[in-house]
Amino acid sequence: MTDSDLARQVRAVSRLTGEFTLRSGRIANEYFDKYQFEADPVLLDKLAEEMAVLIPEGTEVLAGLEMGGIAVVTAVARHAGLPTAFVRKEAKKYGTARLAEGAEVAGRRVLVVEDVVTSGGQVVISTGDLRKLGAHVDHALCVIDRQEGGAQALSAEGITLRALLTRADLEAAA
């Protein structure tokens, strides 16, 4: 399967048009419903296989962000053979009361995994939280970079964004 075939499949199952409010508060007339490609086990597995080759050398832990990044990171970990941490938006107040569940992140090289990056806001916040826990984070990996400033926002925080697909890839697949 070529990258354009993969982009065409993702676009076919997840592209919606209408009026959508994004996490940043901005209104968009196009939206990629990540849950549609995450809910398709065959497509998710193919995406994860392709993403695994984008993992920076030396990565010790994959950290998936709540909620969409959890399905993606679990699938990618299967192909990469790396342990996984599941990162909450905030630590729960009961049980373990941890922000990052699963693999230990302190003192380890951690790759943040997200589904779709637009402004990069949640990746910046979660990376800051992981760094406070002692994680070494300098890369993030996503399925789709909407190319709306996320890579630049992450770069300003010392994070390099690697994306399997970009908005341009999905538009070219039309």
Image: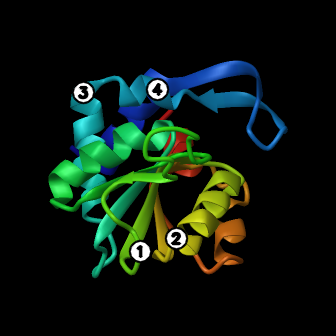
Q: CA distance from mark 3 to mark 1?
A: 31 Å
Q: Three-letter amino acid code at disc 2?
A: Leu
Q: Three-letter amino acid code at disc 3?
A: Pro
State the SS at label 1. Answer: loop
- Who comes first in sequence, dot 1 or dot 4? 4
Q: Residues within 10 Å of mark 1 (few under 14, many from 20)?
A: some
Badge 3 is on which residue?
A: 41
Q: Three-letter amino acid code at disc 4?
A: Tyr
Q: Three-letter amino acid code at disc 1?
A: Ala
- Who comes first in sequence, dot 3 or dot 4? 4
State the SS at label 2. Answer: loop
Comparing labels 4 and 2, the label whose residue is closer to the camera:
2
State the SS at label 4. Answer: helix
For residue 50, side relative to residue 29 (left or right):
left
Q: CA distance from mark 3 to mark 4?
A: 11 Å
Comparing labels 1 and 4, the label whose residue is closer to the camera:
1
Say above or below: 131 vs 41. below
Q: CA distance from mark 2 to mark 1?
A: 6 Å
Which residue is found at the position 73% from the left and 60% from the top? 149
Quarter of the image that includes the N terminus = top left
> Which quarter of the figure has residue 10?
top left
Q: Position of residue 4 (x, y in %)?
A: 36, 45
Answer yes or no: do the residues labelled 2 and 1 have beta carbons within 8 Å? yes
> Please, which colouring scheme is shown?
rainbow
Comparing labels 3 and 1, the label whose residue is closer to the camera:
1
- Who comes first in sequence, dot 2 or dot 1? 1
Badge 1 is on which residue?
A: 106
Answer yes or no: do the residues labelled 3 and 1 have beta carbons within 8 Å? no
Badge 2 is on which residue?
A: 133
Q: Residues within 10 Å of mark 3 (few under 14, many from 20)?
A: few
Residue nearest the viewer, comparing 83 with 116: 83
Q: Position of residue 115 (x, y in %)?
A: 48, 44
